[in-house]
Image (tube, grey):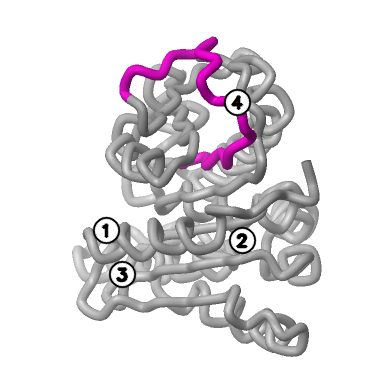
Amino acid sequence: REAGGVSCTLFHKNPNWKIGDTTIKEAIPFVYCLHGRLGKQEDIASIAKETANLGFIAVTFDNPNHGLRKIDGAQNNSWVKGNQTHSVDMYAQILQTISEVSLMIDFLPHKIGVMCSSVGVLGISQGGHATLIALANEPRIDVCVSFISSGDYKLNMEVRYENLVERAKRKGLPLPDPFESLVPKQFLEKTVRRYDPIHNTKSLCKGFRPLLIVNGGEDKLVPIECNIKLMKEIEPLYESAGAIMNLKHVILEGVKHETPKQMVDLGLQWLKEHLGNKRSSGL
C-alpha cells in the first residue's frame, strides 16, 4: 500500500484480511515500526507481525534512501566507511522518516478504510532515534517504544567521533577531520536543537505519554549515556505529574547494538499494556 507516495506494508492478526475488507468496523490502534540504518522494512517485519497479533494494524516502510528507496547507499554509511557527511545524512533521514509517519497518520486510515483509535511507534537504532524525535514533535503519537536509541544526537556523535579517533590511533591511520568539520556547529544549533528530544523535553513530556526506552549495556555504537542524560531531565517531570508508571528505561546487561528476544518482548508488552484500549486525544 502507499500513502502520499510512500510504499508501506500493513500487518493484521487476521492473515486473510485485505485492504477494503469491511470486517474491521471499530477503530483500532496503528503502530508504525521503523527499521535501522543500513536496513530495510523486511528487517522489522517479524516484530511488526508480533505487534499486529496484539490486535493492532502494524505498518512498515523503507526509511529514506534505504531498501527499494535507495538512491545513494554511500550516504547511509558512517565516518568509518568514509562518509564525511554521516551526521547530517542520518539526521536528514530521521526527520524525513518522522514527516512520513505524520503523513501516514493523516492519510493511511482513509486509504485502507480502517479507523485509527490511537497511534504507537516502535523503532530500532536509527528508527529508535526517530521514535524519540517523533514523540517530541508529533503530539498525535500516544505510545513510544525505542530500542538501542539516543535522545541526544550531539552526544551520540561525540561518542562516535571519540571512537573514530581511537580507531585511527590504534590502526596507525590518519586522524579524522576535526569534530566541527564533521558535525557543523550551525547544523547543531539550527537543526538538532530544534528537533532533538534533549532540547525539547517539555514537548516530549506533553501528556506524559507512555515511553519505553531499551538500551544494550555493552552497546558501543549507541551507548547508554546517550539516554541517561535525557532520562535525568524527564523523570522529574513524569514523577511530578504522577505519571512515572508511563516512563521506563531498561538497560540489558551484556547486550550490544542488537535487539534480542528479551528486548522485543519488553516492547510488545509495553504496547499491549499502554496502547491496547487507549483512545487518542490527538486524532
Quadrant of the rendered image containing residue 233: bottom right
Q: Earlier in the sequence, mark 1 or mark 4?
A: 4
Q: Earlier in the sequence, mark 4 or mark 3?
A: 4
The dot on residue 25 is 4
Viewer can see residue 7: yes
Disc 2 residue type? Glu
- Between label 3 and label 1, give the one nearer the viewer: 1
Badge 1 density bin: few <14, some 14–19, many ≥20, Cα 10 Å: some
* Residue span colored magenta: 15-33
Badge 3 density bin: few <14, some 14–19, many ≥20, Cα 10 Å: some
Q: Earlier in the sequence, mark 2 or mark 1?
A: 2
The dot on residue 180 is 2
Give the alpha-carbon distance from disc 2 to disc 4, as whole Å: 54 Å
**What residue is rendered at 37% in x and 31% in y?**
41
The dot on residue 258 is 1
Whether residues under marks 3 and 1 lie with C-beta atoms below 8 angstroms apart, the answer is no
Badge 2 density bin: few <14, some 14–19, many ≥20, Cα 10 Å: few
Q: Which residue is mark 3?
A: 219
Residue 164: say if magenta.
no
Element marked by disc 2: helix
| Residue 84 at x, y percent in the picture | 48, 44
Residue 28: say if magenta.
yes
- Between label 2 and label 1, give the one nearer the viewer: 1
Disc 4 residue type? Lys
Element marked by disc 1: loop
